[in-house]
Image: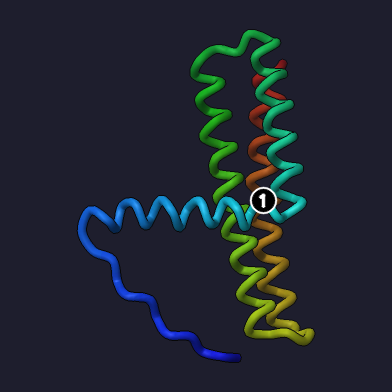
Amino acid sequence: MTETSRPARIDGPRHLLAAGSYSLGGLRRLWLETAFRHELAGGAMAAALLALRGAERWEMAVFAVLFLLLIAVEALNTAIEVLVDRVSPGWSEAARDAKDLGSLAVLCVLAGNALFLILALL
């Protein structure tokens, strides 16, 4: 592994702009993940179904929060995978376990989204 020099620390109001830039960078990286794009498509279809059913505002709000939670957990899972691939390029049981646990976290949030959608559409 090659080490690069650490960038200068940004303080004050510029930090807020930098943080937004870092988040957009994360979104660009997440876009490269097929699972994320599938989740976006599924979320759009679910939102359309809720709208067609005439869901109440609270139902749309709960769905939006659950969906944002799914995106956040998918981002964390991707971060785990990237780090594991960096520090453990070969196969290892610990690397497999880390990736499997991240995947389980995504599955749990997907299940929560699906359960809410089913109940809201009944």
Residue type of the residue flagged with mark 1: Trp
**Residue found at the far left of this picture:** 12
Q: Position of residue 119 (x, y in %)?
A: 67, 23
Residue furthest out toward the top: 54
Image coordinates of residue 99 in percent, x first then y, are 70, 69
Q: Residue at x 55, y 21 (%)?
A: 60
User: What residue lies at 72% left-to-right and 18% top-to-bottom?
Assistant: 49
- Relative to 45, say whether 81 is above or below: below
Q: Answer few, some or many: residues within 10 Å of disc 1's Cα (few below 14, many 20 plus, some between 14 and 19).
A: some
- Quick one: quadrant of the C terminus? top right
* Residue corresponding to mark 1: 31
Quadrant position of the N terminus in the picture: bottom right
- Could you say where residue 92 lies in the image, as x and y percent from the top left? 75, 85
Q: Quadrant of residue 40?
A: top right
83 is higher (above) or lower (below) than 35: below
Q: Name the residue nearer the viewer: 107 or 41.
A: 41
- Label 1: which secondary element: helix
Marker count (numbered)? 1
The way the protein has been coloured in the rendering is rainbow
Q: Is residue 55 above or below residue 36?
A: above
Q: Which residue is found at the position 31% from the left and 52% from the top?
A: 16
- Residue at image location 59% in from the left, 46% down from the top: 71
Closer to us: 96 or 12: 12
